[in-house]
């Protein structure tokens, strides 16, 4: 049932202003998502659409276009000029929540694939990592189902400004915090595995007398650089999430300007982690591979030209 608050002297004005500022940050998150998509679309066409289809191509397109859906949903949910009924508010929340769950699962598969390659396609490592992400993602799925059951959508109108409010019954908030803790454990564990094997490979390259600036060294550096940047962003998201969940101040004053600003910044960081840096875990590797192929083709062409010139010189001297 839609609730209306139209008293000009109402004490709800601080809440109205806080949610209006939060909507500005939601629009900023939408701009970040769409700008990055536009920025990388040419690379996407060249390195994904025009290449042979593979699991990585499907995962890239999945997480990239889930991001566009996610950005559209937060605009529907947060912009105060858009009116949603209670039922539609609930549907938008459920779609938003499942988008996060599916995106996290896709990123887990991407990370497992990268680690599998770094560990020289070890079958034991692959099985071990698959078991871990299955446990974590099944738990996430269960929490998402519980959220569907215990979430209540409600449209609230403050002096013409529409708000989509979601409230929960039961212990969902506690389960959601546990899910974030498990996600943090996974990301820390994945980073430790990546760092350990990268250090081992670099030591092996040095022992064999190979330059760390060679193809293998550059490839490992690229994998670690993109992984660390992704992890730093995830760590920022986790810190924001834990502060909002466990700080008495934020828990008590949910509708204050400070709390809504925190939620808005969290939303931007989450879009950066899931839908900007996530796809780049694949795109950066494909771009590096394309550069190697281009450099190889250039070298072969130059070598062929040089061979032909030497042949021409040799022929000319023999005549």
Image (cartoon, helix red, strand yellow):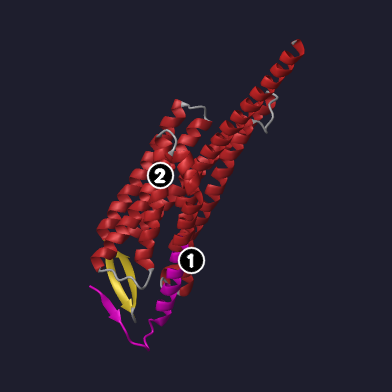
Q: Position of residue 18 (x, y in %)?
A: 44, 75
**In the rendered image, which residue does mark 2 sit on?**
61
Callout 1: SS: helix
Give residue 262's mark.
1
Q: Quadrant of residue 134?
A: top left
Disc with the residue nearer the chain's start (1 vs 2):
2
Q: Position of residue 58 (x, y in %)?
A: 39, 40
Residue situated furthest front in the rendering: 319
Gap in Å between the C-alphas at discs 1 and 2?
30 Å
Give residue 279's mark.
none
Callout 2: SS: helix
Q: Position of residue 159 (x, y in %)?
A: 34, 82
- Which residue is located at x 67 percent, y 32 percent? 212
Residue 41 magenta = no
Residue 249 in sight here: no
Q: Quadrant of the C terminus?
A: top right
Q: Quadrant of the N terminus?
A: bottom left
> How many numbered circles are shown?
2
Magenta extent: 1-29
* Within-10-Å neighbours for mark 2: few <14, some 14–19, many 20+: some
Residue situated furthest right in the rendering: 317
* Within-10-Å neighbours for mark 1: few <14, some 14–19, many 20+: some
Q: Position of residue 251 (x, y in %)?
A: 42, 68
């Amino acid at each position: 049932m839609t609730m209306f608050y139209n008293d000009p002297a109402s004490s709800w004005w601080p809440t109205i202003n806080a949610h209006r500022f939060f909507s500005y940050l939601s629009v900023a998150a939408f701009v970040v998502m769409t700008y990055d998509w536009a920025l990388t679309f040419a690379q996407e066409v060249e390195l994904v659409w025009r290449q042979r289809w593979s699991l990585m191509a499907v995962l890239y397109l999945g997480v990239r276009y889930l991001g566009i859906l996610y950005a559209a949903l937060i605009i529907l949910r947060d912009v105060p000029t858009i009116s949603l009924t209670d039922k539609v508010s609930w549907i938008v929340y459920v779609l938003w929540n499942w988008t996060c769950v599916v995106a996290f699962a896709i990123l887990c598969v991407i990370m497992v694939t990268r680690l599998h390659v770094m560990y020289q396609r070890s079958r034991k490592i692959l099985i071990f990592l698959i078991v871990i992400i299955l446990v974590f993602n099944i738990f996430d799925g269960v929490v998402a189902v519980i959220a569907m059951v215990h979430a209540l959508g409600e449209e609230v109108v403050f002096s013409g400004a529409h708000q989509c409010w979601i409230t929960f019954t039961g212990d969902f908030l506690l389960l959601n915090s546990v899910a974030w803790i498990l996600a943090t454990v996974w990301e820390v564990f994945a980073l430790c595995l990546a760092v350990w094997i990268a250090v081992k490979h670099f030591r092996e390259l040095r022992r064999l007398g190979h330059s760390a600036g060679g193809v293998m060294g550059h490839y490992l550096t690229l994998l670690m650089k993109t992984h660390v940047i992704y992890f730093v962003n995830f760590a920022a998201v986790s810190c924001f999430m834990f502060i909002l969940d466990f700080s008495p101040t934020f828990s008590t004053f949910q509708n204050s300007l400070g709390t809504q600003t925190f939620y808005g910044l969290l939303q931007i960081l989450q879009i950066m982690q899931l839908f900007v840096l996530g796809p780049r875990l694949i795109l950066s590797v494909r771009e590096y591979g394309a550069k190697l192929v281009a450099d190889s083709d250039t070298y072969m062409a130059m070598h062929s030209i040089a061979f032909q010139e030497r042949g021409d010189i040799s022929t000319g001297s023999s005549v």
